[in-house]
Amino acid sequence: SRMDESLPICLYTADIGEEIQARVELEKAMTGALERNEFQLCYQPQVEASSGKIIGAEALLRWHSPDLGPIGPETFIPVAEQSGLINSLGEFVLRKACDDLKLMKEAGLEHIRIAVNLSPLQFANMSLADDIAEILKSSHIEPSRLELEVTESTLMRNMNTAVEAMMNIKKHGMSLAIDDFGTGYSSLKHLQLFPLDCLKIDKCFTRDIEDKSSLEITLSVIDLAKRLNLRIIAEGVETDAQAKFFRLHRCDELQGYLFSKPIPAQALIELMKEQAEV
Ligand code: C2E
Ligand code: CA
Ligand code: CA
Ligand code: CA
């Protein structure tokens, strides 16, 4: 009957309704959250594969909403993108990362490199590179200490302006990494056009390294990156076997829970100081 046919549609609508409701709630909680200092930046160490020494770290946003509790970036970044908050949030991240780089420099850790994620909207802003260069200059930080991570899908989304935006970043001497590589659709031709310094192998390949097909893909990605003279960072390294694999195949850096979870800046500084002592 008609009743029966409409039932699933009603349920479906209810689900979407719930989703919208959740979004609205998130957006509401995010309004003013930056001003209330609810966002924090953590750092996940990136270790040199050959020595195990921390040589860099990726800045990762954390949000603890007093009303909703801790919420992951995978949930709130897309909402921030849609509400426009991403611009001020992105600026907060860049400023904080530069402040922390300065702290590290003052603690005698001058050689650390900090990587910051850029959202698609930030990347599409043509004055971004100039703005970042300003921040670096005012904090007296060598531009090469900052690496900007752009995902493969962000690059493919803005193909016509992507190369120009990347050239601007390179012009100022910052480092450029392609993130989540292997999950999008860029071709060898695209990769050759992009002025990249570094390629990050997505954690889904690391996770499935025991699979024959995943193994073959990972090996060809490593080979491709080497041919293009890119530094390679393997992400999501959780086990000794995975670390061993990437060392064997001469990846430059490793990042993952095996070494450390993302931690506050001060904890990172302590960790690096400890390493410097041994
Ligand atoms: P991503 O850039 O791919 O960051 C790596 C994610 O993998 C992080 O999740 C990190 O905590 C997680 N991870 C690290 N090691 C391991 C491991 O060994 N195993 C597993 N399973 N996961 C690991 P997180 O912090 O939840 O961030 C998720 C995503 O949110 C990031 O993915 C990035 O796309 C985005 N994000 C985080 N912070 C920012 C930011 O400041 N700006 C922008 N635009 N995006 C951000
Ligand atoms: Ca990243
Ligand atoms: Ca990644
Ligand atoms: Ca990701």
Image: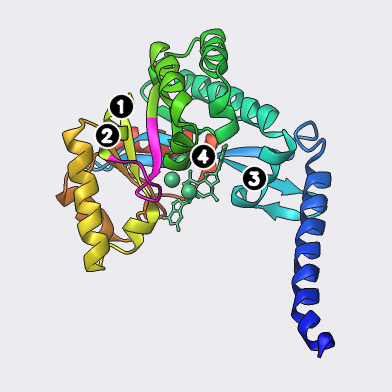
Locate residue 243 relative to residue 17 in the image: left or right. left
Please report the bounds of the magenta region as a residue range.
177-187
The residue nearer to you, when weighing 217 against 29, is 217
Pointer 2 with pointer 4, Cβ within 8 A: no
Question: Magenta stretch: residue 181 in it?
Answer: yes
Q: Can residue 207 be seen in this view?
A: yes
As drawn, the label of residue 78 is 3
Pointer 2 with pointer 1, Cβ within 8 A: yes
Q: How far apart are marks 2 and 4 (CA)?
A: 41 Å
Pointer 1 with pointer 4, Cβ within 8 A: no
Q: Which residue is under mark 4? A: 267
Q: Which residue is under mark 1? A: 193
Residue 246, percent from left and from top: 22, 51
Locate residue 16 relative to residue 251 in the image: left or right. right
Mark 1 or mark 3: which comes first in sequence?
A: 3
Element at label 2:
helix
Label 4 sits on what residue type? Answer: Ala
Label 1 sits on what residue type? Answer: Leu
Which quadrant, please, contains the N terminus? Answer: bottom right
The residue nearer to you, when weighing 137 against 184, is 184
Q: Which residue is drawn at 56% across and 8% down?
A: 138
Q: How far apart are marks 1 and 4 (CA)?
A: 39 Å
Mark 2 or mark 4: which comes first in sequence?
A: 2
For disc 2, does the CB lie below 8 Å from ligand 3? no
Q: Closer to the camera: disc 1 or disc 3?
A: 1
Q: How far apart are marks 4 and 3 (CA)?
A: 28 Å
Q: Residue at x 80, y 70 (%)?
A: 14
Mark 1 or mark 4: which comes first in sequence?
A: 1
Q: Distance between the residues labelled 1 and 3?
A: 28 Å
Which quadrant, please, contains the C terminus? Answer: top left
Q: Which residue is under mark 2? A: 189
Mark 4 or mark 3: which comes first in sequence?
A: 3
